[in-house]
Image: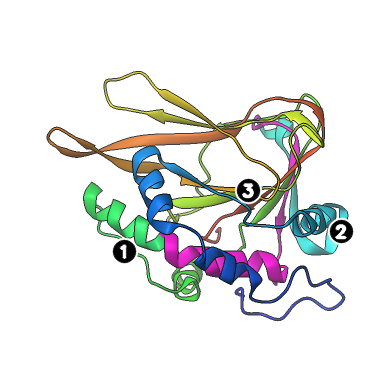
Amino acid sequence: MNAALPAKAGSRPIGEAGAISARVAGLDWPRLDADLDGYGNAVLKGLLTAAECEAIAALYDEEAHFRSHIHMARHGFGKGEYRYFRYPLPDLVAELRQALYPRLASVANDWNARMGEEARYPERHADYLALCHAAGQARPTPLLLRYGPGDFNCLHQDLYGDLAFPLQVAILLSEPEADFTGGEFVLTEQRPRMQSRAEVVPLRQGDAVAFAVHNRPVQGAKGSYRVNLRHGVSRVRSGSRHTLGILFHDAS
């Protein structure tokens, strides 16, 4: 039921064991924390190699790895499709979850304190998953998305139950201008009594963006106030775009 489970029989290992954890540890986390605090998002450059990106994207048509298949247009989410992984997750996806979570939990705990929220997140991802499962949220949420020409993802928030981790990570698996054009990652921030702010996040193949799922605190003249965020993907103009989404809570 968690990322520590062994790989599924017949599945292909992707990447060297421990490589992701070492890369995550080697990132400039003071800068990333500052970007998250200042803008609600931070780019993790070169998190995956091109070979890892291609191997993960190639899983999309292998039914055994996934628990559900969503066509966005049927639900008014946009145009395109995505698949939620089933447990046990591919090793690389599980390691990304385990390695990224403690870094982001520190940010999440600081944000909750500043926003007056009581919830605090444990240091280990396995402990947080145990809380999710105890609350009846036991379905894995990492997903693989595929967009073709004309596809897009409407602005939204990924909230799947009472427990929702306030940050998530999206990793671009395709190379802009080579595999696809258009398809920019977009964030909007709704500020109290002010017009919304939009931000387009430039990514290359293997880059990841960590971002706020729902709310984040912003320092004002009278202390911190809460802003509301949504994210999406602009229209893909040509080619094929794959993205790996890493969410840290499980779904009900």
Residue wearing tag 3:
207
Q: Which residues are magenta?
A: 76-104
Rendered view: 35 above or below 80: below
Pair 3/1: label in front: 3
Crowd rating for badge 1 (residues with CA inside 10 Å; few <14, some 14–19, many 20+): some
Q: CA distance from mark 3 to mark 2?
A: 24 Å
Secondary structure category for the residue under label 2: loop
Q: Residue at x 63, y 53 (%)?
A: 46
Three-letter residue code for mark 2: Glu
Residue wearing tag 2:
62
Q: Nearer the viewer, residue 78 or 243?
A: 243
Find residue 120 and name its label. Answer: 1
Q: CA distance from mark 3 to mark 1?
A: 28 Å
Q: Earlier in the sequence, mark 3 or mark 2?
A: 2
Percent across and percent down for residue 1 are 62, 75
Q: Residue at x 50, y 47 (%)?
A: 159
